Amino acid sequence: MPVIEFSELELDALKEMMNIGFGQAAVALSEVIDMHVILNVPKIAKLAPEEIASFVRGEIEDPTGFSMVEQFFLGRFNGTSFLLLPESEGEKLVQLFTNDPTIERSGLALDSLEQETIVELGNIIIGACVGKIAELLKDVVTYQPPRFFLGPVDDALISQQIRSSGGLALVFKTVFHFEAEDVYGLLFLVTGEDSAFWLKKAVDEMLVGIAT
Amino acid sequence: MIGNVVIVDDSLVARLSLKSILKETGLSLSEAGSGEAVLEKLKAGPSPDLVFLDLTMPGMGGIETLRAITAGYPALPVVVVTADIQSRTVDMVKELGAAAVVRKPADKADILSVVGSLLEKGRA
């Protein structure tokens, strides 16, 4: 397979689509938890597969204190998505989701509730974001069930979850904050080489549409 | 239509997309790639008739830019174009003085409708 290169304009188009996808995720989330979600400017990186884990790990402050939701998405646009949340934020997230600020971490039941809350959060964010990007590119994706992992989010854990696909990966990242609660999380989308080739073609078609 | 419109977005593709929608209007179109750049442009003059503003930009973000434009040029209508259409975001930018909020990706009918009504209002 030939080496794939992206022009500045193609990368800009991908980043803009991620921006729209992440925006859609923020809207979906704010509707569930009735709280304003603030998004940062997305980041995009073209990496060799062996660089992905260190890139993801390099974006988080303390890999030992994170929980992770991972979900595969399948279509012509396909890959792995990771939602990373500081482990200490689980209790706040449960309070936000249940709209019950009195819930406190007190044992196994809440731990289970925390886990389910984080998985649901991941499902909503990933589904809205990936689904919107696929829609913009006239693709349809399906999802495998999300999986929960409690830290440490190290290279081994990340590498195990990434489906190997050729010699490069595109990694998209954004940070979102829940206003007023000081809760934040990171969302990564990782696509392999096969999907990157398709993305390039789909983006080029979209750019022709804009130029004409 | 007659008028000068500035499109502010860090994404070249987003700017091109809006330009392709607006080109049939006959409006004079110019661009700025950041909040800082549009403020420089406004300072240098002449003042445009309308500004399209993205919210999620590096450096001086869209909210800060909106605040600066509405404070310095209160008569200049600003249309926020954003993928973030959470109700609180929409309320916030309207409170800050945005004349309208349009969802990304830009829809031709929405954009033309907003431009038509705001430029007409400006001339009334």
Image (cartoon, coloured by chain):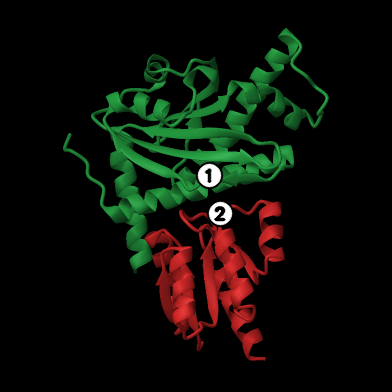
Chain colours: A green, B red
Q: Where A194 falls versus B5 (above or below)?
A: above
A158 or A116: nearer the eye?
A158
Where residue B15 sits, quadrant-wise, is bottom left
Residue for point 48% across, 28% down: A61
Residue linked to disc 1: A22
In the image, farthest residue toward the bottom: B124
Mark 1 nearby-residue class (10 Å; few <14, some 14–19, many ≥20): many
Give the residue displayed 65% in from the left and 72% down from the top.
B99
Give me the disc on residue B53: none
* Residue A136 seen by the camera: yes
Q: Is residue A123 left or right of residue A174?
A: right
Of B36 and B101, the residue lying toward us = B36
Q: Could you tell me residue B101's position as x and y percent?
A: 62, 64
| Horizontal arrangement in the rendering, residue A117 relative to residue B52 (left or right) | right
Q: Which residue position holds label 2? A: B83
User: Dot 2: what SS?
Assistant: loop
Residue at the (60%, 21%) spot, across then down: A87
Residue B107, can we see it? no
Specify few, some or many for label 2: CA neighbours under 10 Å numbering under 14, 14-19, or 20 or more.
many
Q: Chain of mark 2?
A: B
Labelled pair 2, 1 in contact (Cβ < 8 Å): yes
- Taking B120 as reference, is B57 above or below it? above
Judging from the image, mark 1 belongs to the subunit labelled A
The spot of residue A9 in percent (x, y) is: 31, 56
Residue type at numbered disc 1:
Phe
**Residue A4 drawn above or below residue A17:** above
Determine the residue positioned at 80% across, 22% down: A103
In what element is the residue under mark 1? helix
